Structure formats: C-alpha cells, structure tokens
Amino acid sequence: MNSFDIKRFGQTLRWVLSVNFRLMLLWFTGSILAVFLGEMLFQAMNGHTAPLYFIQNISQFQTMLLMLVSLIMISSVVARINEKRKREAFMMLPSSNLEKYLSLVVYSTLICIAVAFLSIVLGDSIRMAWYWISGYTGPEGNVMLTSEDGVTYYWWSSSIPTMLKNMAPVIVYDGFADYPLEFALVQSLFIYGGMLWIHSIYTLGGTLLRKYSFVGTTMFVILLITIVVRTAMTFQLTLFHSRWNNGELLGYEIGIIGWILAVAFPLLSVVNYWASFHIFKAFQLITNKWFNYDFHK
C-alpha cells in the first residue's frame, strides 16, 4: 500500500467526520448560544455607553476564546479514538498510517477550528439581529460612534472584523513596507514559525498524553517560555527592538534571541511532527492510563 493516496485519505477523513458528527453538531449549537448569551451578558454587566467600546471589548473576548478553543482542539487530536471500539474500527480502516494520522490532524485543526470560528460568527450575528430588531441604543442612547480610523460603529455592528484584526500580527497589519526587508523577513519567520511550533507541540502533546493533554502541554509550554524569558533577562538579550534618539526613529534591530528562535521554531516543528507521527504509528489497542506510547518496549 502506498504511504499516501488522496482518495483513501478522503475516505478516512469522512469516517472521522461521520463518527463525530453528532457530537460536533451538539457542540456547535451550544457554542452559538453561548456566544450570543455571553455577549448579551457582557453588555448587561458592563453597561458600555458607546458601541465602539462594546465591539472592541467583546472582540478581545472572542479572540481569546477562539485561541483557547483552537489549542484545546489541536491537543485533542486523538481523543476521537480514545474509546476502544472507535480505536479498533479506526485501526482496521483500509488506509495507511500517514493517511489516518493526517485525517485526525486535519479534523482537529482545520475542521474543528473552522466550526468554532463559525459558531462565533453566528452567535455574534444573532446579537447583531437582536440589537437591530429591538432598536437598542445603550444606557445613554448613543446609537453610533466613529473611531479614529474613520470606521462608524453601531450597536448592531459585527465584532468579527475587529476580532480578525486582533489576531493578525502587527507587522502584517501595519504592512511589510514599513520595515527593513531583513527585519520584516526574520520577524515574519519568527511569528509564523512560532505559530507552527505551537501547533506542532500541542499536536505532539495530544498524541502522547492520553489524559489532560491540553493542561499538560500548556504547562510544558509555559515552562519553556519562562526559561527563555529568564535567560533573556539574565543576559540582557532581546528579540526585536527599535532604536530611538530624542523621539526620532533610527532603525530596527534583530536581537540574538530573535535570530535563534526564527531558525529554531521551524526545525523544532518538524521534530515535533515526526515524533507525533512516530507515536501514532506505535498506537496499541490497549494503552496505559496516561500515555499513548509504551516507553518500555
């Protein structure tokens, strides 16, 4: 059997979708209601007097929610086959290990996160419709407010564009043309390499840990970040910084930590994905309580 065939991969992914569809639909419906009620409760508790501040604040909440849910979904990469019956059926599918592994990764990464994003969009849309139909004007009757960038916000305005803006790296949002080429390239490699590394480490944690994969992986990531930050502070190392003189921008510089991490993130990501796939290939129908890998064999 070839290691990868697009047709077999599609059939395997469809199987993963079919066995999880009912749970996903229930979770999707509940998330829509939770987002809608959360936004309504947020305004009721805080009493924002202008729609601009309300939109900005709920978009920050949505950003954190989507990021949190995304990490949980990624770290649950093999949770769909933790049950013995599902694992047996999955292992017997006529597809290669690579096709099975990629189907789980695509499901937990692309499909689940897309569903989470869509639930936020629909929940926010219900709030928009509710405010528009009811003619909501806020505690002080302010219907609209124009921001500094010229965008006019109403109580029934969508918070999704602001949420997407919050998630975009500053260098992407400001534009690469505002920075020196080398600085822009290295910082972009650092940012996107860091995102890839986060995905890979949570995928590895989700593959290795049978229970509490999100909590365990998050604690490990926090430990690594703490070590890097303490090392940088001890030796006065920087990531990226700008040089100023009497309020005048002199230029941008790439610190030693910035160079190291920009190179290390992509390389470590490859190692994490390789280790995750290696663990997956060694899956047994009967695993121990905490791990999906037998360290004694």
Image: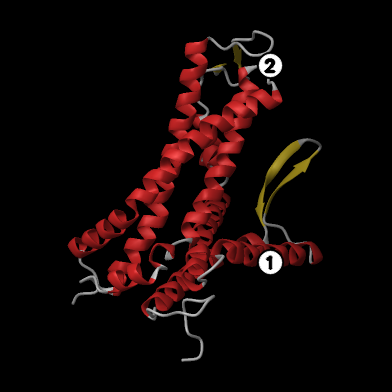
Residue 135 in view here: yes
User: Residue at the spot x=50%, y=61% of the render?
Assistant: 75
Q: Which residue is mark 2?
A: 49
- The vertical placement of 256 against 110, above or below, is below
Secondary structure beneath dot 2 equals loop
Residue 171 in view here: no
- The vertical placement of 296 against 53, above or below, is below
Residue 194 position, x and y percent, is 55, 58
Q: Earlier in the sequence, mark 2 or mark 1?
A: 2
Count of marks, rendered view: 2
Image check: 196 left or right of 250?
Answer: left
Q: Amino acid at mark 1?
A: Leu
User: Residue at the spot x=28%, y=59% of the render?
Assistant: 13
Residue 138 position, x and y percent, is 63, 14
Image check: 40 left or right of 244?
Answer: left
Find the residue positioned furthest to the bottom: 297
Examine the image and state in which quarter residue 125 appears.
top left
Local packing at callout 2 (Cα closer than 10 Å; few below 14, some 14-19, many 20+) is: some
Q: Which residue is mark 1?
A: 223
Q: Amino acid at mark 2?
A: Thr
Q: In front: mark 2 or mark 1?
A: 2
Disc 2 from disc 1: Cα separation: 41 Å
